[in-house]
Image: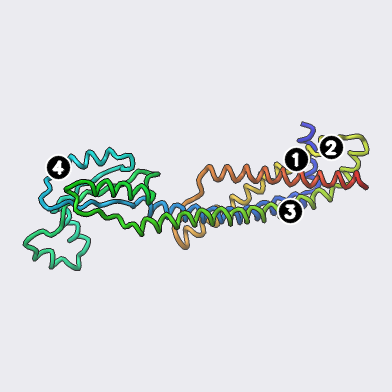
């Protein structure tokens, strides 16, 4: 409790420096927050594209619905497959005429339905990699009544390549922004500690241990970090609202990211305060 009271007194005695530290943490993490918001929405967009990965198995002419139903039940047992939809020749023609309205005259003049029946496969989460899709497609080709299997291999490969690039870029750029935030926070906290070097010297003179001296500063760093994290969260939310209302719809950050960000800010504040006060204690002892 004594350390908490001393930390509160320290903040009250130097509100300008405390405000500077909070602002430095807030603005630094605001940049990280903007990047996290962008990276999250890119990942969601790619995940949405990935969720549309499907395989279509076109059936040979004359394949009965009973045989197709048996195959459908068997294929739904594949670990990678979430759902199998049977599309009859009539349904295929209807869907084609509805989607390709510019060819409505052609469809209406047809005497024989040229479109084959098919099985459309949707995949489970975690089983949409190019390897999984190719493995399922190869198994489908093993059925005698399957004439052709299509899934757009190049498209699937491109989606996963984009997701890998996005994940790698997020890791590198996110780390760079976090490093910049750490440097800025360290400078701000160092200035606050230097302004109280006389107080540290007096505490050493009266015999206070290093741990006793550091404790109030660590609590200050914790409070400052949390306040800066909340400031960054507010600024990020404001930017999100502005972009969503004026430019394009975006998804807000997951709760776990928000909690992690606040905890990260608290740890940054404590780490910066610990490093700065430790250096100041050593400087005073050396002098």
Task: Give residue 210's mark.
Answer: 2
Quadrant of the drawing holding the N terminus: top right
From the viewer's side, name the closer residue of 177 and 134. 134
Disc with the residue nearer the chain's start (2 vs 1): 2
At x 32%, y 47%, the residue is 135
Which residue was labeled with disc 3?
A: 20
Q: Position of residue 128 (x, y in %)?
A: 37, 48
Estimate the spatial distance between the alpha carbons at disc 2 and disc 1, rounded to whole Å: 12 Å
Check disc 1 and report its element: helix, strand or loop.
helix
Which residue was labeled with disc 4?
A: 67
Estimate the spatial distance between the alpha carbons at disc 2 and disc 4, rounded to whole Å: 81 Å
**Tag in front: 2 or 1:** 2
Estimate the spatial distance between the alpha carbons at disc 1 and disc 4, rounded to whole Å: 72 Å
Disc with the residue nearer the chain's start (3 vs 2): 3
Instruction: Answer with the quarter of the image where residue 31 lies.
Output: bottom right
> Local crowd at mark 4 within 10 Å, few (<14), some, or many (≥20)?
few
The image shows residue 89, relative to residue 109, as above or below, that is above
**Tag in front: 3 or 1:** 1
């Amino acid at each position: 409790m004594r350390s908490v009271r001393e930390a509160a007194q320290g903040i009250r005695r130097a509100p300008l420096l405390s405000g500077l530290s909070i602002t430095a943490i807030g603005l630094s993490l605001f940049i990280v927050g903007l990047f996290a918001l962008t990276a999250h929405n890119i990942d969601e967009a790619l995940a949405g594209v990935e969720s549309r990965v499907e395989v279509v198995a076109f059936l040979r002419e004359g394949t009965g619905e009973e045989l197709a139903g048996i195959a459908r039940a068997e294929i739904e047992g594949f670990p990678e497959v979430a759902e199998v939809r049977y599309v009859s020749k009539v349904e295929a023609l209807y869907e084609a005429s509805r989607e390709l309205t510019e060819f409505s005259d052609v469809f209406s003049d047809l005497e024989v339905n040229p479109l084959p029946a098919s099985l459309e496969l949707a995949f489970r989460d975690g089983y949409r990699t190019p390897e999984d899709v190719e493995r399922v497609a190869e198994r489908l080709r093993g059925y005698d009544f399957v004439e052709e299997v299509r899934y757009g291999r190049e498209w699937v490969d491109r989606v996963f390549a984009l997701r890998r690039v996005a994940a790698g870029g997020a890791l590198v750029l996110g780390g760079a922004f976090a490093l910049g935030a750490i440097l800025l926070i360290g400078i701000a906290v160092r200035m606050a500690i230097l302004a109280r070097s006389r107080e540290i010297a007096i505490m050493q003179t009266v015999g206070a241990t290093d741990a006793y001296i550091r404790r109030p500063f660590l609590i200050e760093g914790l409070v400052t970090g949390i306040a800066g994290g909340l400031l960054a969260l507010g600024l990020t939310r404001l930017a999100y609202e502005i972009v969503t209302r004026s430019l394009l719809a975006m998804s807000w950050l997951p709760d776990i990211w928000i909690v992690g960000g606040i905890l990260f800010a608290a740890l940054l504040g404590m780490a910066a305060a610990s490093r700065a006060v430790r250096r100041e204690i050593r400087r005073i002892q050396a002098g």
